[in-house]
């Protein structure tokens, strides 16, 4: 988060310097704080609405509730609100600003296709995201990455519609500004995705420690990798929240492709889980 905030400040300073408008830097800082505030309070509601998740009761999904309750007792966490996402794909995600205001959403496919150990592994993974505060971190990072993209778009537009100010600029400075406006959103996205992948590995390991049975999550991930059901309301805006990318298809695993993946390759996650000594 510190790196990202510094990145926002650096981009704001560069754009302000190139256009000779220091107010851009101050605007970038203020806007990032406002957007972070919004993300902190409302990110969970947005994510749940985008996925089409519906709340469930203890009576309607008793087994689901019992598994989560037992894991929460072991982890020392309050029981989050539980939701179901309609559809046959095996997937799940956690969201919320902290452990006291968290929610876990699981697809119907996960409840139907995973056995008890596999479901425990998936839910332990999501509870680990809550315990590790990943749910807040991811929300803030998404907002900051979006802010950098907005700033870059605004800078490019001002280049063409900025009036006489642009004619008085040093050509080299303007060129650097243009290059930065193109590369900054790409760099922000790579940072965002790299953080997301790191946190997935951590949640896998934390979840395995919680259940004391890494094979449960490893087996669930293998089922997920073989599952080709489409997600009805998949969105690139919240794809990083899920335990596995909701967009199904053959994933390329070259080093360049991995830079733009929201999740580590499943085979790497399974290998890491089976390499744990618990």
Image (cartoon, grey):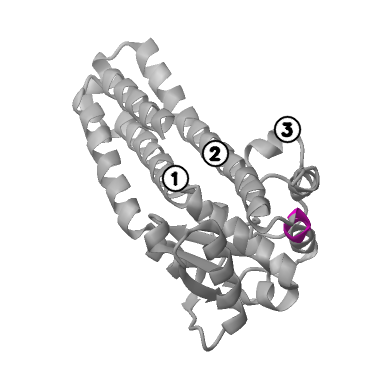
Mark 3 or mark 1, earlier in chain = 1
Task: Say what secondary structure mark 3 lies in.
Answer: helix
Give me the C-alpha separation between circle 3 and circle 2.
Answer: 16 Å
What mark, if any, has residue 255 been given in the picture? 3
**Crowd rating for badge 1 (residues with CA inside 10 Å; few <14, some 14–19, many 20+):** some
Q: Where residue 170 appears, x then y in whole percent?
A: 31, 11
- Is 42 situated left or right of 205 in this image? left
Q: In the displayed structure, does residue 224 sit left or right of residue 204?
A: right
Is 91 rendered above or below residue 153? below
Question: Closer to the camera, 226 or 161?
Answer: 226
Q: Residue 49 placed where, x, y %?
A: 43, 69
User: Which residue is the site of mark 2?
Assistant: 195
Are the two marked residues, 2 and 1, in contact with CB atoms closer than 8 angstroms? yes
Residue placed at 63% from the left, 60% from the top?
246
Identify which residue is drawn at 67% across, 72% down: 110
Mark 3 and mark 1 residues within 8 Å of each other at the beta carbon:
no
What secondary structure is found at the residue carrying circle 1? helix
Q: Position of residue 28 (x, y in %)?
A: 27, 34
Range shown magenta: 214-218
Residue under the image location 44 percent in, 45 percent down: 137
Give the class, few, some or many, for how many residues have Cα within 10 Å of label 2's Cα (few <14, many ≥20).
Answer: some
Report the side of 125 relative to 94 (left or right): right
């Amino acid at each position: 988060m510190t790196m990202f905030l510094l990145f926002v400040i650096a981009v704001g300073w560069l754009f302000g310097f190139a256009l000779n408008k220091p107010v851009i830097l101050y605007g970038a800082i203020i806007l990032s704080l406002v957007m972070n505030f919004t993300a902190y309070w409302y990110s969970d509601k947005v994510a749940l609405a985008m996925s089409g998740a519906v709340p469930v009761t203890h009576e309607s999904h008793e087994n689901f509730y019992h598994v989560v309750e037992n894991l929460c007792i072991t982890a020392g966490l309050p029981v989050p609100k539980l939701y179901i996402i309609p559809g046959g794909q095996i997937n799940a995600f956690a969201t919320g600003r902290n452990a006291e205001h968290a929610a876990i959403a699981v697809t119907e496919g996960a409840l139907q296709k995973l056995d008890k150990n596999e479901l425990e592994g998936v839910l332990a993974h999501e509870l680990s995201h809550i315990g590790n505060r990943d749910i807040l971190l991811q929300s803030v990072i998404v907002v900051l990455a979006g802010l950098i993209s907005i700033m870059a778009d605004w800078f490019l537009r001002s280049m063409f519609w900025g009036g006489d100010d642009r004619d008085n600029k040093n050509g080299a400075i303007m060129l650097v500004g243009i290059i930065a406006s193109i590369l900054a959103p790409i760099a922000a996205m790579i940072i965002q995705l790299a953080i997301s992948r790191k946190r997935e590995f951590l949640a896998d390991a934390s979840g395995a420690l919680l259940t004391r049975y890494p094979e449960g999550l490893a087996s669930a991930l293998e089922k997920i990798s073989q599952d080709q059901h489409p997600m009805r309301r998949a969105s690139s805006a919240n794809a990083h929240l899920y335990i596995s990318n909701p967009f199904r298809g053959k994933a390329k695993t070259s080093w360049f492709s991995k830079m733009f993946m929201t999740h580590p390759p499943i085979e790497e996650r399974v290998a890491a889980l089976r390499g744990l000594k618990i």
